[in-house]
Image (tube, helix red, strand yellow):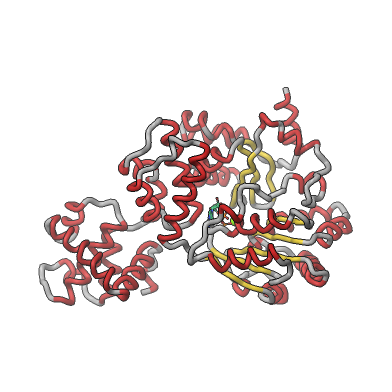
């Protein structure tokens, strides 16, 4: 009964030409009844706007499971109905705790976060689980972390603080941590750029700009996530510009995140970009192996308090995950969640080969399009030799090193077995393959230039950027 009311409430929101039931049945078809019943059925539709959908799931765990395994397929299905949709976001709503009811009925929030009635209520993006104390630091994110701590201690120290970096690198986590810290005694507003635009347009339509201005200009701290999605018309940028200036003038702190530096934001006015660069601009880079290891440890430690038995993952598996899941911290965290879920479901901790199966699609993602042919082609270009020379049996020094490099890269970037690799390199014996791999590993340890070349090649191969050599 309660659910019906909830659903009605949900359906009254802006669902236009959009039938969630249809999407659900399509998910069932494409992903199978088992997966649907165990996971996807738990997804509810909250609202749609611009180019993304807000969905809900009952727990963080289910969200992580779904995002790490099925998100691409879900998005594809949604796109087949609405091609404008480029993203989905999940909100965690535990229905058993009646939170839906809260969302729709609670009009006052006693926390120090401001909302514009109904719509902002749905958009309290401050997540109590993304804090400074569980943000693991390393070379790649140290500066961004320090700057975030600094503004949390002393607002306006850097103003604005602009944090940029690729997907899943921890930008939202940092903004969230700042928000959590500062909301203890300040008015904090945390909003995505998309939401800002949406709210702006809505306020104009409702002839309610006064309230909009009031809300944004009264905050002590404004955190705007993913500013690259801001692509509004003149009027909106104008409003944003004035809000921005008004806030800075009155000493409020502004923190912005983006996937690129200010000067590369394409649809934003020059004067706004130059304001963005006026404080401190810091980036977060891809995590290196040390940071990945630390994150794996920290994450397991956290999970251990929830599932003590199932979080005992062998060192082998831990090493494998931290050395193979290299694209983003989000994927790394997703991978760990998946492994721990496996041990919960099957009541055993996975072996290394089981891990490879469980993480297959994530691993494929990394080796996307990586074929032996591509590796050989790119390595030959890099060392300026021909493919015939590489595959010949000649042992001149200038051929041996490239050959060993190509063999080494094949070993680490594909899932081919040693004999398979041997066959692709003119039927070489698998002991030759092992020898090549070991030689390069040793060279890498001794010689930074070798490591650098290997990394360059690895990047070219992974991104398949043949034309950039
Ligand atoms: P972004 O906003 O850059 O796309 P997020 O902040 O959403 O990335 O991070 C993706 C996931 O990885 C989140 O679950 C986040 O908590 C986690 N994460 C990212 N960086 C770290 C870190 N340094 N330490 C711990 N967890 C992290
Ligand atoms: Mg983010």
Relative to 413, 21 lies left or right: right
Seen in the image, is 391 located left or right of residue 293?
Answer: left
68 up-or-down from 236: above or below = above
- Quadrant where ligand 1 appears: bottom right
Quadrant location of residue 338?
A: top left
The image quadrant of residue 312 is top left
Pick the quarter of the image with the C terminus. bottom left
Q: In this image, 59 relative to 31: left or right? A: right
**Picture quarter with the N terminus:** top right
Instruction: Report x, y in % for residue 165.
Output: 55, 64
Name the side, left or right, on which 305 lies relative to 272.
left
User: Whole-percent x and y of residue 199?
Assistant: 77, 54
Q: Nearer the viewer, residue 37 or 116?
A: 116
* Relative height, residue 365 to residue 337 (above, below): below
Q: Nearer the viewer, residue 379 or 137?
A: 137
Residue at 58% in and 66% down: 144
Looking at the image, residue 72 lies above or below residue 194 = above
Residue sitting nearer the eye, 111 or 241? 111
């Amino acid at each position: 009964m309660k659910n019906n009311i909830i659903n009605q409430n949900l359906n009254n929101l802006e669902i236009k030409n959009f039938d969630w039931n249809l999407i659900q049945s399509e998910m069932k078809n494409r992903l199978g009844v088992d997966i649907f019943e165990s996971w996807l059925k738990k997804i509810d539709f909250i609202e749609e706007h611009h180019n993304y959908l807000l969905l809900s799931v009952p727990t963080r765990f289910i969200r992580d499971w779904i995002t790490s395994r099925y998100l691409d397929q879900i998005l594809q299905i949604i796109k087949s109905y609405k091609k404008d949709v480029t993203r989905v976001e999940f909100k965690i709503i535990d229905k058993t705790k009646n939170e839906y009811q809260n969302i729709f009925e609670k009009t006052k929030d006693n926390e120090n976060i401001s909302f514009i009635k109904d719509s902002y209520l749905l958009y309290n993006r401050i997540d109590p689980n993304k804090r400074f104390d569980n943000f693991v630091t390393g070379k790649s994110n140290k500066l961004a972390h320090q700057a975030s701590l600094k503004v949390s201690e002393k607002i306006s120290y850097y103003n604005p603080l602009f944090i940029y970096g690729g997907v899943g690198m921890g930008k939202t986590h940092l903004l969230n941590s700042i928000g959590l810290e500062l909301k203890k005694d300040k008015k904090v507003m945390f909003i995505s750029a998309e939401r800002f635009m949406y709210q702006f347009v809505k306020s104009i339509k409702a002839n309610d700009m006064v309230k909009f201005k009031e809300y944004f200009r009264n905050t002590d701290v404004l955190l705007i996530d993913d500013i690259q999605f801001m692509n509004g018309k003149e009027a909106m940028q104008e409003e944003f510009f004035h809000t921005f200036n008004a806030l800075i003038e009155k000493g409020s702190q502004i923190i912005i995140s983006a996937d690129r530096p200010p000067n590369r934001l394409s649809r934003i006015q020059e004067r706004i970009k130059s304001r963005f660069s006026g404080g401190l601009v810091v980036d977060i880079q891809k995590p290196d192996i040390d940071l990945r290891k630390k994150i794996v440890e920290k994450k397991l430690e956290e999970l251990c308090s929830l599932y003590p038995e199932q979080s005992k993952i062998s060192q082998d598996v831990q090493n494998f995950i931290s050395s193979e899941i290299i694209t983003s911290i989000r994927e790394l965290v997703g991978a760990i969640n998946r492994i721990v879920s496996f041990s919960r479901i099957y009541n055993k901790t996975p072996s290394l080969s089981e891990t490879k199966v469980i993480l297959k699609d994530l691993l494929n993602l990394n080796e996307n399009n990586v074929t032996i042919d591509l590796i050989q082609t790119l390595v030959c270009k890099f060392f300026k030799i021909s493919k015939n020379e590489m595959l010949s049996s000649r042992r001149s020094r200038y051929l041996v090193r490239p050959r060993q490099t190509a063999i080494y890269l094949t070993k680490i970037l594909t899932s081919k077995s040693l004999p398979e690799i041997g066959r692709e390199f003119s039927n070489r014996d698998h002991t030759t393959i092992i020898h090549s791999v070991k030689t390069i590993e040793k060279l890498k340890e001794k010689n930074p230039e070798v490591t650098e070349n290997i990394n360059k090649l690895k990047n070219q191969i992974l991104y398949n950027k043949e034309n950039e050599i």
